[in-house]
Amino acid sequence: QVQLQESGPGLVKPSQTLSLTCTVSGGSINTGGYYWSWIRQHPGKGLEWIGYISYSGSTYYNPSLQSRVTISSDTSKNQFSLKLTSVTAADTAVYYCASESTTVDYWGQGTLVTVSS
Amino acid sequence: EIVMTQSPATLSVSPGERATLSCKASQSIRSNLAWYQQKPGQASRLLIYAASTRAADIPARFSGSGSGTEFSLTISSLQSEDFAVYFCQQYTDWPRTFGQGTKLEIK
């Protein structure tokens, strides 16, 4: 069973860059047919899909965030990462990493990132 | 993008009773709909995909139906562990989009 664990700072200052890493165990991010995704949830709100990096290294981002998002991977560490630039208070959310085929098959537990000075 | 709308926002049901949750898509998504369960402090889990197919190890009391733009999730006899937040998600198109969630609470 694939397990995912998010890590990174829980507090980021406005205008700075949010950086999170997802460590994958129980499976390889090189496995064909899988997408490694980031999803966020604003406090008390629904889920917003941020983007993915595929097993082949291709990426796709939500157009609403595309100008500020980069997702990358480190296959040697079986990790993938999220960078979100120029953050504001509106980026305060729980951030989840996930594994998708067509559906989101596995989720991390999520990590709260607060944007505040 | 495809907008997913869930109702109600909160549903109060007694244990042992049936609960039915609704999800509507802003355009046809055929049967490309999934349901997820979210509990505090736990990883969310996939319950239903292809609108009506239970994921591995999901109890038979969970069932999904619908196609096109209207979908529902039914839990036939609520157990204590079923009280949680439920999300629907379309996977017809990118970006993937989710409903706002239905909180299922104990009455």
Image (spheres, coloured by chain):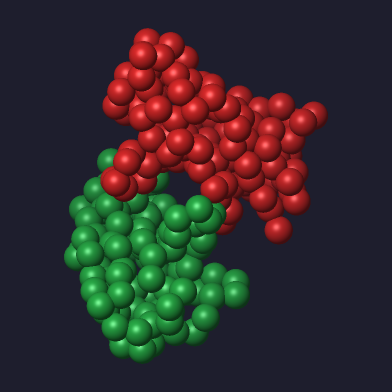
Chain colours: A red, B green
The quarter holding residue B18 reads bottom left
Q: Is residue B52 left or right of residue A59?
A: left
Residue A94 lies, in percent from the top left, at: 43, 39
Q: Which residue lies furthest to the right in this view?
A: A76
The residue positioned 30% from the left and 23% from the top of the image is: A89
Residue at image location 69% in from the left, 42% down from the top: A24
Give coordinates of residue B72: x percent, y percent: 30, 72
Residue A5, percent from left and from top? 63, 42
Point out the image quarter for the N terminus of chain A.
Answer: bottom right
B25 vs B18, nearest the viewer: B18
Residue visible at 75% across and 51% down? A26
Horizontally, residue A64 falls left or right of residue B45, namely left
**Residue in the picture at 67% in, 50% down:** A3
Residue B26 percent coordinates (x, y): 21, 53
**Residue closest to the eye, A17 or A106:** A17
Q: Quadrant of the C terminus of chain A?
A: top left
The answer to whether B1 is drawn above or below residue B28 in the figure is: above
The picture quadrant where one finds residue B55 is bottom right
Asked if residue B102 can be seen in this view, the reply is yes
Residue most toward the top?
Answer: A15
Q: Is residue B70 visible?
A: no
